[in-house]
Amino acid sequence: MSNKLNHSMSLAKPDAVDISNKQKVALAIGIIGLFILTLALFNTHFPHKGLFLTLSLALIFAGTIIYSRDAYLTTLEGIKNDGVWFKSISSRGVWGWILGVILTAFYIVLYFYPQYLGLGKDGAENTGLVSLFDPLSNLLSGRNASQWFVYGTLYTVAILAFGYKFMLKYRHNRYQQLRTASVMFFQLSFAFLIPEFMYVMNSDLPYYDLKSIWPLNYYLFDEWSVKAFLSNGNIGLGLLLFGIISIFVITPILTYKYGKRWYCSWVCGCGGLAETAGDPFRHLSSNKMSAWKLERWLIHTVLVFSVVMTVAMVYSYLGYDHNTFWLTRGVFISLVMGFLTLVFAGVMYFKRHELGKDAKYGAIGYFVVIVLLVTMHLTGTSEHVLFIKGSDLRAAYGIYIGAIFSGVIGTGFYPILGSRAWCRFGCPMAAILGFQQRLFSKFRITTNGGQCISCGNCSVSCEMGIDVRAYAQKGENIVRSSCVGCGICSAVCPRGVLKLENDTMKGRINPTEILLGNNVDLMDLVNNK
Amino acid sequence: MEHIVIIGNGISGVTAARHIRKLSDKQITMVSAETDYFFSRTALMYVYMGHMTFEHTKPYEDWFWEKNSINLKKGYVKHIETKNKTLHFSEGDTLSYDKLIIATGSKPNKFGWPGQDLDGVMGMYHKQDLENLEKYAPNNKVCKRAVIVGGGLIGIELAEMLNSRNIPVTFLVREDSFWNGILPEGESTMINRHIKNHHIDLRLSNNLKEIIPDENGKVKSIIIEETGEEIACNVVGLTAGVSPNIDFIKDSDIETGRGVKVNPFLETNIQDIYAIGDCAEQHEGINGRRPIEAVWYTGRMMGETVAQTICGNRMQYNPGHWFNSAKFLDIEYQTYGWVFAKPRENESHFHWKHADDTKCITVCYDKKTNAFLGINTFGIRMQHEIFDTWLTEKKDVDYVMKHLGKANFDPEFYKTYEADIYAVFKNELQTV
């Protein structure tokens, strides 16, 4: 046996582990549901759109539910990872690549060519797939569907159906069940239904998914968005204030108490999809040191980009005159720099020993942002910031980060890069929460003395690519900014070594080399080095 | 520069190498005939089950060794010439050392059964065993049934492995209940039922008589000693324990018994030669432990200790309180302190089992002094640090039972049973 995976190239029977006949029937049912959507995509005319849409979604649900029940309820409770590295679809085999290409193509069409989904241009009637969703959209908000409504519906269906599957898979684990119920709830209500109802109540308000927080919600502070909020009286102002409070007040408090998992694994929609539909691909995230190095540069670059882009956006629609509005360009840029300086100085003062070498990188990042902001203020005109058109900067962010990174790569590449490529390498929200988690949070994963046997199940199942084993085998707590607290490492550990906990800050990071159960003198000796 | 050579790249040898590197800049060479790089033996089962790839079993990436200037040599040591401090390899070359650490681990026991060397008969210890299993039992069409001989930790892991590929398994266990030389009756019988719930054909009090070959020298069937029954099978797993892997040392000057004889400093009878891990045999067990400990973490601890000695700080291997863990199919097991299968003189056991038949604990205490001596837990995770402290502080059993919840290590939101357990405990004491 070689160490390399040896995939069967047969499309007919690529899997070493067979699925039951019932599962085959269930798959067929689900595929018929998808097939209806595909027919609609290719402009097949359905007479009763509402009926066929219902049928399609019902078949997708039914297929997933029947499949999951047969897969998990016919066996005893426990870890169900048998054969994930043999199945073509979940081990970058032929099916995995096919799925990856289909998903990627879908995202490219969705973001860049919505007309192919049937979106009517300039008020024209919808056709194709989008028109199939018109009845549902009309039912909820009294308007025809857009490509985003189609996407939102399918996204919600995926989280609900695969969330159910995930809950059966981990039916012995209440942490997994509760957090999955939570992401299912937040997706269905906050992301899908409430914005539609908000539209019904006040159609001038911009779409606002209340749980989507800046910088993930990068368009919140766009000029059109802010204007729309402000022109809608107290509700609009309240929502805008909620957006600001979310990132500056609510987020740090919750992250301090529970770690970034309160968001990434319990609330967030991207996380929700990754944990449910993306679960079969979680083990594909690379644990290599090189991947970690790339991750640190990439995610923080995106964060800097998003901060500078947002500041530039807001800056470009502010004025110079105090008398018109108190928040002038000068005041705004001073506030931003003051805030960043405060954060930077605070971290350096309290945490520089803990950070060690990383403090240097933090300082470089801080000065890059400050220089950019100062340059922006000195050279900025009403049209141009940083010598480029302000709106171009925003558009670039929208396309490269908002669409390509988070959508096309983040989700389209699930079967190749693992389920959390976006969360890990790109999400600026995750970067901020991670920063808080690493420095000011009670959350950690505690390891259990000397029980670790270095098997590596934890590292393999970490969707964020953390080499959990490297900590566990040293008896060291895991305090990593990237940890989303999904708890799967703890679930799959065969020796009961890992536990997610909120405890005191003191003693949270415990770099000891010698493990419990050893000679006490030896422990002292080695720890003194 | 002093040249330290380590034979074996398992957890013991690797730990020794890493710690010697931390403490010194001595030249270090690790020799292995099994694999190029250190891998976690405990994870081999998960490779067969498809939970991970072999790559994932390596705790350190391949660049780690060069970066820490630990030389790796693949080769099979045939003979140790202690006078000239030279190793002779079966490939014909030699390697000289200043200090030698023997860390060759174990090999599966074979008890001279007829047919034990046929094709399709294997242990489950080395990477080569995994390769063999992949060859002879890739699926249930090639391997219509497998028979496992020996009811210990490796036996039940092999059963779980084969089960994951829907290969029917017959599991021959010499004892009248699974692992009951170690586990108290209540626990052992619960695991019996759990094994059967997984549709594994568990045969208690059954021994292997012989393995029958087909015309090509491959396994065809086995015969059971007690009943004479013949069971057709394509694979036989021999998992009746392990013993030190030291055949190549027997003709050298190094003193051996079952393992390489060492003193508490892990020194052999020859100066500058040490033995650690599964292959080392203490003249007398330390702190009530066995002379040979084939456990993952004791190998690691011996590696840490011998590194100190070699770097000029001569140190005894002096392990703390006993602990261990395992997983029986879906049921996790942890133990802290000593709980023997049958209470020894002065000892008493308190046993609690959940109605769902997958969780139980056994607490061992001294009948006279009421001192807490140890705990076995099944299906409930407990915290090592707390029990270590309680054992050191010699807490009495009432204290431990009352505060058992403090030691709970189950994931958040799990249902807890400690209050239940304490109520049963108090109730039983009153009726006694």
Image (cartoon, coloured by chain):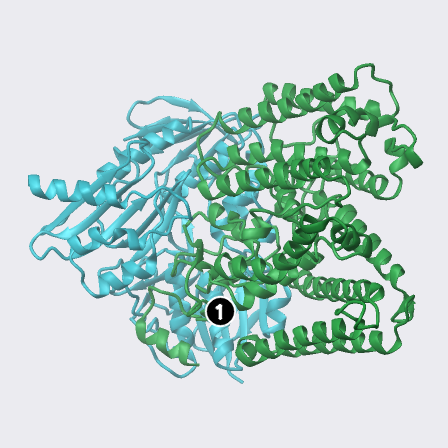
Chain colours: A green, B cyan
Where residue B133 appears, as percent x and y from the top left, is: 54, 39
Q: Quadrant of the C terminus of chain B?
A: top left
Q: Is residue A288 visible?
A: no
Which residue matches tag 1?
B6
Name the foreground residue: B4 vs A348: A348
Q: Quadrant of residue B180?
A: top left
Q: Quadrant of the N terminus of chain B?
A: bottom right
Q: Residue drawn at (49%, 34%), measured in percent from left and top? A: B162
Where residue A188 appears, as percent x and y from the top left, is: 62, 36
Name, please, the residue furthest toward the top: A47
Where residue A479 appears, as percent x and y from the top left, is: 52, 63
The answer to whether residue A290 is left or right of residue B309 is right
A181 shown above or below A486: above
B84 shown above or below A225: below
Secondary structure at badge 1 equals strand
Q: Is residue A26 visible?
A: yes
B379 shown above or below B102: above
Name the foreground residue: A51 vs B49: A51
Q: Chain of mark 1?
A: B
Name the foreground residue: A98 vs A236: A236
A121 shown above or below A496: above
Where residue A161 appears, as percent x and y from the top left, is: 62, 31
Q: Residue drawn at (20%, 45%), measured in percent from left and top? A: B422
Disc 1 residue type (three-letter):
Ile
* Other-residue count near label 1 (Cα within 10 Å), few / some / many at <14 / 14–19 / ≥20: many
Name, please, the residue furthest toward the front: A323
